[in-house]
């Protein structure tokens, strides 16, 4: 855990509804974590919590794994910015998955553009995605040879309700087909992408994976 890490907090309200909050780590001292005031992802408003409020906390580590831990508010601190003190059980973190980038299956709108502006752009959907690349459903009238670089425009519907648009360049790796489907799929890896936008993709994968895990509980 490092200063500036984005932390997602989950807690139930009085009606048993799960709410998610976003905050950043401002300071670390041993097993105490100082965070700025959490913002409700649905309302976009800063939320106030009493001492003793319990959360399930999640964050993405340096290895791109998702880490979870149970925590509670230990107190408050007023400095340049108001902060909450959380217990950080650094020896009791649960790692959900360890991979260079978490890959999830998801259907997102995407448009593909020829970097040489020779071929006409086309729209399609993704089959899966990670911070390192994605696979798309290749329309029957389209062919992209391995090694070709294209520009893509991708739409990410975040759980907060915000829509994020990502632009990147990617290299075609291979075309393949799943046994259970007659669709051709094209796998691609990002070659030029703004790191802030890569982190948005990782965040989308992170949120989607957590949503699926909650369904299984």
Image: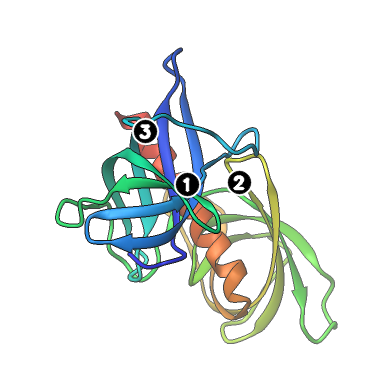
Task: Give the residue drawn at x 75%, y 58%.
Answer: 123
Q: Earlier in the sequence, mark 2 or mark 3?
A: 2
Q: 24 above or below 73?
A: below
* Residue, disc 1: 207
State how far apart marks 1 and 2 are (Cα): 8 Å
Secondary structure of the residue carrying tag 3 is helix
Task: Tell me the tag on residue 214.
Answer: 3
State how far apart marks 2 and 3 are (Cα): 16 Å
Position of the C terminus by quadrant: top left
The image's colour scheme reads rainbow
Secondary structure of the residue carrying tag 1 is helix
Task: Tell me the tag on residue 18.
Answer: none
Q: Nearer the viewer, residue 106 or 49?
A: 49
Q: Are marks 2 and 3 in contact (CB under 8 Å)?
A: no
Q: Are marks 1 and 2 in contact (CB under 8 Å)?
A: yes
Residue 79 x %, y %? 50, 56
Crowding at dot 1, Cα within 10 Å, few <14 / some 14-19 / many 20+, comes out as some
Q: 8 above or below 120?
A: above
Q: Earlier in the sequence, mark 1 or mark 2?
A: 2
Residue 206 x %, y %? 44, 52
State how far apart marks 3 and 1 are (Cα): 11 Å
* Residue, disc 2: 158
Q: Earlier in the sequence, mark 3 or mark 1?
A: 1
């Amino acid at each position: 855990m490092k200063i500036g890490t984005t932390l997602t907090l989950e807690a139930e309200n009085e009606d048993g509804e799960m709410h998610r909050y976003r905050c950043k780590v401002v300071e670390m001292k041993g097993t105490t974590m100082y965070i700025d005031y959490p913002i409700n992802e649905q309302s976009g408003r800063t939320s106030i919590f009493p001492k003793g409020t319990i959360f399930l906390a999640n964050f993405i580590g340096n290895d791109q794994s998702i880490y979870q831990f149970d925590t509670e508010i230990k107190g408050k601190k007023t400095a340049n910015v108001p902060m909450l003190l959380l217990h950080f059980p650094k020896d009791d973190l649960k790692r959900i998955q360890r991979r260079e980038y978490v890959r999830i299956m998801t259907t997102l709108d995407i448009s593909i553009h020829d970097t040489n502006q020779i071929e006409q752009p086309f729209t399609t959907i993704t089959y899966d995605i990670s911070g390192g690349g994605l696979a798309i459903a290749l329309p029957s009238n389209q062919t992209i040879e391995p090694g070709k670089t294209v520009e893509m425009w991708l739409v990410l519907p975040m759980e907060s309700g915000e829509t994020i648009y990502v632009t990147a360049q990617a290299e075609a790796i291979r075309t393949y087909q799943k046994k259970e489907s007659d669709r051709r799929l094209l796998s691609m890896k990002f070659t030029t992408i703004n790191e802030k936008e890569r982190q948005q993709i990782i965040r989308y994968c992170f949120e989607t994976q957590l949503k699926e895990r909650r369904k299984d509980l």
